[in-house]
Image (spheres, helix red, strand yellow):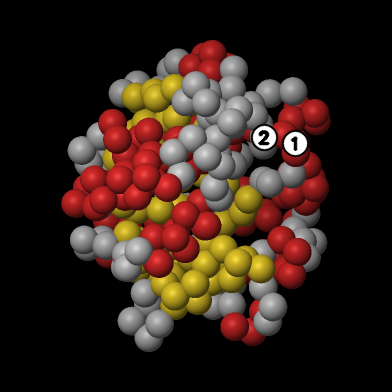
Amino acid sequence: MRVIFLAAGKGERIFKHFNINKPLIKIGNKSLLENLIIGAKNNKETKISVVIGYKKKNILTALKDYKKIDFITNKKFNTTDMVHSLMMGLKKYDDDILFSYSDIIYDGNILKTIKKNVNKDIVIPYLKNWEKIWKIRKKSIYADAETFSYDKNKYLNEIGRKIKDKNKVKGQFMGLIFIPKNLKKKILKIYQNNFDNKKIQTTQFLQYLLSEQFKIKCLEYKGDWYEIDDYKDYKFFIENDVFKRIKKNFRF
């Protein structure tokens, strides 16, 4: 399996506080991206790639001591969203691929769990205790979170829409998507025919795939997860005691 970290963007909402690529923000001794890469490297037989774009030399320099990493340059990072970077990775490699955002924190062992549960469908892990995380981050559920529901067989029904009733939300998307190589050509064709060079959010694209009769398996995740979406998220993470256990587990 290959893991591709999507790190082409600038991180506009937090950039002014650090003046550096968002994935390179440090919490402790290592950056968000470095910790994700270390977690991936701890899983045997995992190949690693990083999609870069904005000031790519910053990331290349930061990762110069990490061996056997492939880099893909998204020259259109200013006019596209992460889905475009995802498609670049999908097009380049003939592998089963786990795509990962690079501004999130999670236990690298989730890769082992995904490997054990993959099949010929798309797989997305979801956060079961999402309401607790949103409260910790002091985010408005109705303004910030999105719909997420699945059927009795844990196949996705809906994702990425505005929440009207939080009791109907069964989890939250974590910024991780596994795509088996058998679906590569079909997904690329759908993107090229409908969204090529256009901005579309990841969850919106997943919802579109549902409309095209793709099956997306939902995998429950019970471990630690956090997102550094903006400076408020960063401050809460470094200042609150509730994150002591997470920090201990994540080498910060």
Nearer to the camera, 125 or 183:
183
Q: Which residue is mark 1?
A: 14
Q: Residue at x 42, y 47 (%)?
A: 194
Q: Residues within 10 Å of mark 2 (few under 14, many from 20)?
A: some
In the image, residue 77 lies at what x, y percent? 55, 28
The image quadrant of residue 235 is: top right
User: In screen coordinates, is 110 left or right of 32?
Assistant: left
Q: Amino acid at mark 2?
A: Gly
Q: Residues within 10 Å of mark 1 (few under 14, many from 20)?
A: many
Q: Residue at x 25, y 34 (%)?
A: 93
The image quadrant of residue 214 is: bottom left
The quarter of the picture where the C terminus appears is top right
In the image, residue 98 lies at what x, y percent? 35, 47
Q: Secondary structure at mark 2?
A: loop
The quarter of the picture where the N terminus appears is top left
Residue 62 seen in the figure: no
Nearer to the camera, 35 or 97:
97
Report the residue that reaches farthest toward the front: 193
**Mark number for residue 94?**
none
44 over 153 or under it: above or below? above
Q: Which residue is mark 2?
A: 11
Q: Residue at x 35, y 35 (%)?
A: 89
193 over 54 or under it: above or below? below
The image quadrant of residue 88 is: top left
5 over 123 or under it: above or below? above
Nearer to the camera, 198 or 78:
198
User: In screen coordinates, is 131 left or right of 65?
Assistant: right
Q: Amino acid at mark 1?
A: Ile
Q: Residue at x 44, y 75 (%)?
A: 157
Residue 208 seen in the figure: yes
- The reply to whether dot 2 and dot 1 touch (C-beta < 8 Å) is yes
In the image, residue 137 lies at what x, y percent? 75, 58
